[in-house]
Amino acid sequence: MNPRFFRLDSNDSSLLLLSLAHAIPTVVYYGAKLRSAVDADTLQTLTSNAIPNAKLDGRTQLPLLPENSRGFFGEPGLQGHRNGGNFTHQFLLESVEENTDSLCFVASDNSAGLQLNITISLHALSNVFSWKHRLTNTAKTEFTVDYLGCPTLPMSLAMNQLTTLHGRWGKEFQQQTVELAAGRFQIDNRRGRTSHEHFPGLILSEGTTGELAGTAIAAHLGWSGNYRLLVDNISEHQRYLQCGELLLPGEVILKQNESYETPVLFTTQSDAGLSTISQQLHQFARNKLLPKWTRTKRPVHSNSWEALYFDHDMDKLIALVDAAHATGAERFILDDGWFNARRSDDAGLGDWQVDETVFPDGLHPLVDHVRSKGMQFGLWFEPEMVNPDSALFRSHPEWVLQCPPYPLLPARKQEVLDLSQPELFEYLFYSISILVEQYQIDYIKWDMNRDTLNAGSGQQASQHKQILAVYRLMDALNKKHPKLEIESCASGGARVDFGILEHTGRVWASDNIDPIERIDIQHGFSLFFPPEIMGAHIGSATAHLTGRQTTLDTRAIVALQGQTGFEFDSRKLNDEERATVKHYTDIYKQNREWLGEARLWRLPSIQECLHVCGMVSADQTIALWTVVSNGSHLQATPGKLNLHGLNPDAIYEVTCLNANIDYLAHFGKALPQWMDDNSMSLSGELLMRIGFMLPYMPPQTALLLRCRELSA
Ligand code: GLA
């Protein structure tokens, strides 16, 4: 039984693990699917290191849970102690459950009184692997867990390009690629939510990897709280990747038979470039993660926020509903401002009762009007928050996460509620539930507008419990109201991750809906998430966050990359604008069903300012391509566009779907010849190999192209 070897194969990837001398297994191969059979002895021979000079005398491993006690000098997978003792550990493999799509290892360190369960599962179709650890204290005394990483994965030194996502409010998902050298790259997030600052995911690739070719591995921690991602370079073991939850001091103290489970780490790998990596993650999310309702026709939203902000008034709202309906909206969302004392962001959070001074008959006249138009109704909540200026805080100041005697640190004049307190949890559940029933609410925009600090509950750190309680509250509401849809919003995109997506199903990627800014935001988002779950609203001519002015065509074409909606004030549209918006929402409605299963291709840049991405239907009969310019191209013409992902043998009709194309050629003398008839028919092979000319594209213009198979 020694060495022991374990294998998992998905459609395109293989994972091989080896356990020597009953130690926790080590990943010895994670890459393209292997056709050859392998055995444990061969693997041991192939992967046993040289023993270098000036190092330990024996060979060392880099197992799923690296242990200092076995000669590992990097970040130990487990850091904890029993009142100062048992600070180091050494687990022995006890049993393994092997299935075609999962491996479950049980290992114990009897002298430390600890048991470790390691679970690796795979989704064969999407090539996504899920990894997690669970630690159980089997001894009588308490064991303090300071850190338990998810399974650690060795990485080749050739994978020296590291792509991560960063940002701030209004500028989320900004891509950064750095070249790794010696030392460690580490992201520690302590903001109590997924955060604008960093995204809990990364992509490692080779220098030659691009969108359409090359080797890459993506890893994403599905967790909406504090976390650490690290890629370290250690001379005995080349490079390794480790991710895990960052625990606050004393947050997890296990009594006998109690366990701590890590969040799930999701990974996927490919030799076919970054777009394929993204497609695999999208397919996984669609098939395994997201609620079923995300697979149905996604309605066009009209949201009241940028149209009215806190200026809630029944007449204005009714007029907004009428105007939004005339422009194609199918769901009306009443954003922040409807509840007690909420006339600005100074007060009211926590008091989830309709403000009768503004709505004397409750929300009924509005909801009835929305329904009379055949539209659905959605409502904004921020359940985890309270304003000190609220009835809730005045009667229950003890319901706030806090560390007395230190003062509270307000942000947007609000504090974070301690959801681990059962009475508060019940209050939130019932106050939201009553409204869902009373108004038959179809959808909740669940916001979370501040970072969490000093997450104390009764003098104990409670950040870990807080996140689990948020998930539990969402689950309780989903269970009670099976048709309810929840969107995750956190000052825009500060809570988007695979953890929250198990409980919600649509996300607000950013408060910034300036289409030019959106290019990068949506690009970064699309690396990990399927586009159809991203709210993408058309904003006003002058973007509220940036002051940039753009045409309606550009705003609408960029918004078509997600679940389209309106944030502008539909009441202010003139007839021509209304027709333009209608034109694009009709395109969204005609295509949304296949878009929900589409493959997304990000094409390499033709010129720096041109950004091209396309959605191709799963059966390759139809595709929508977007070309957006965020500057002036250097060449006199943008050049040739070579499409990707089409069926080479099919004949496609290519059509420009822009409502207005004149604006594409302000200073150009003519459009490319194929656009004279605004349509051409060509094989997929020629569209991909020879390509075709793009029109002159001044800054801030966008082009929407459709390829439709003629025989289909
Ligand atoms: C956050 C959201 C916005 C809006 C406001 C309301 O900033 O991201 O979309 O809902 O809160 O206060």
Image (cartoon, rainbow, N blue to C red):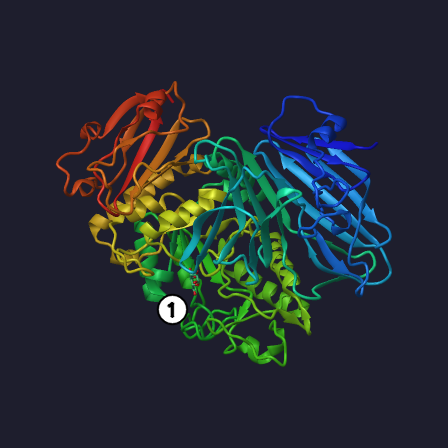
- The residue drawn where x is 24% and y is 28% is 679
- The residue drawn where x is 60% and y is 27% is 33
- The residue drawn where x is 28% and y is 22% is 681
Looking at the image, which is closer to me, 285 or 319?
A: 285
Q: Quadrant of the N terminus?
A: top right
SS state under label 1: loop
User: Which quadrant of the figure has residue 99?
Assistant: top right
Image position, residue 238 (x, y; %): 62, 42
Q: Residues within 10 Å of mark 1 (few under 14, many from 20)?
A: some
Q: Is residue 408 left or right of residue 636?
A: right
| Residue found farthest to the left | 669
User: Which quadrant of the figure has residue 407?
Assistant: bottom right
Q: Quadrant of the C terminus?
A: top left
Image position, residue 485 (x, y; %): 52, 51
Q: Is residue 711 left or right of residue 159?
A: left
Circle 1 residue: 310
Looking at the picture, which amino acid does disc 1 mark? Phe
Looking at the image, which is closer to me, 289 or 4?
A: 4
418, above or below 685, in the image: below
